[in-house]
């Protein structure tokens, strides 16, 4: 039994992941987000989303001026790549539409994480069940809160207390801000 679990592949090469990113660019949600970024005046270069090898245990990230990185060595499925691209595109969209977004400001960071967690499908109940979280009622907001805290506390400018206070302060406004969607997908 143990030998079988060792055969399960963890991660892809950068080239394989780059091909998966190309496939994700054809999905309806990714196309929708990219179209709305362009409508908002943000141009996305050919290399805006790239596969990289990551030392940290994370799926990917958005870095102002550098675009979106997808951690090829932490991806297991095409769906994982799609999910990272969607989540990070929401951060990129937030920065595009808010000229004064400051990632060192815990409230700004928390707001974008709340939106990305809520709008990307990161916290869909099926994903939560696969992560081992079995709660059905109220799971989505609980998941978003857990994931916001994980991300914002990794910000060197945000202590755990500052992250929690920031999340609570902006929760209602940011959770209910569904742009560019009419409602949460």
Image (cartoon, grey):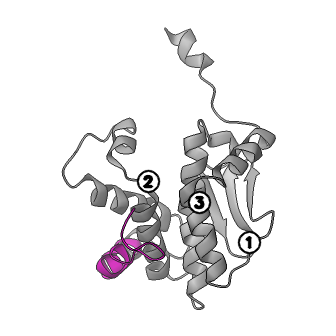
Sooner in the amino-acid sequence: mark 3 or mark 1: 3
Gap in angstroms between the C-alphas marked 2 and 1: 23 Å
Mark 3 residue crowding within 10 angstroms, few (<14) / some (14–19) / many (20+) = many
Q: In the drawing, does residue 41 fall left or right of residue 59?
A: right
Point out the stretch of residues depicted in magenta.
163-185
Q: Residue furthest left?
A: 137
Residue 18 image point, x, y percent:
76, 47
Gap in angstroms between the C-alphas marked 3 and 1: 13 Å
Q: Disc 2 on helix, strand or loop?
A: loop
User: With respect to residue 47, does 172 lie above or below?
Assistant: below
Residue at 60 percent of width and 35 percent of height: 76
User: With respect to residue 8, does 62 lie above or below?
Assistant: below
Tell me if I can see residue 6 in this picture: yes
Count of marks placed on residues = 3
User: With respect to residue 136, does 167 lie above or below?
Assistant: below
Residue at 75 percent of width and 56 percent of height: 50
- Residue 172: say if magenta: yes
Depth check: give the residue in front, 142 or 151. Answer: 142
Q: Disc 3 on helix, strand or loop?
A: helix
User: With respect to residue 46, does 94 lie above or below?
Assistant: below
Foreground tag (2 vs 1): 1
- Quarter of the image with the C terminus is bottom left
Gap in angstroms between the C-alphas marked 2 and 3: 14 Å
Sooner in the amino-acid sequence: mark 2 or mark 3: 3
Q: In the drawing, does residue 126 fall left or right of residue 152?
A: left
- Residue 15: say if magenta: no
In the picture, the disc for residue 44 is 1
Residue at 35 percent of width and 71 percent of height: 164
Q: Which residue is mark 2?
A: 122
Residue at 62 percent of width and 41 percent of height: 75
């Amino acid at each position: 039994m143990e030998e079988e679990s060792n055969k399960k592949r963890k991660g892809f090469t950068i080239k394989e992941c780059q091909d998966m990113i190309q496939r994700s660019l054809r999905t309806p949600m990714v196309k929708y987000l990219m179209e709305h970024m362009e409508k908002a005046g943000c141009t996305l270069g050919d290399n805006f989303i790239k596969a990289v090898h990551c030392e940290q245990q994370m799926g990917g990230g958005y870095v102002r001026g550098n675009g979106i990185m997808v951690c090829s060595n932490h991806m297991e499925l095409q769906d994982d790549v799609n999910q990272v691209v969607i989540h990070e595109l929401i951060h990129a969209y937030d920065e595009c539409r808010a000229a004064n977004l400051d990632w060192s400001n815990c409230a700004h960071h928390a707001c974008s994480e709340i939106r990305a967690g809520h709008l990307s499908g990161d916290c869909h109940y099926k994903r939560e069940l696969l992560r081992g979280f079995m709660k059905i009622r109220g799971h989505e907001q609980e998941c978003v809160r857990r994931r916001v805290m994980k991300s914002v506390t990794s910000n060197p400018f945000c202590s755990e207390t500052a992250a929690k206070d920031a999340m609570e302060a902006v929760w209602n406004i940011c959770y209910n801000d569904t742009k560019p969607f009419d409602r949460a997908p």
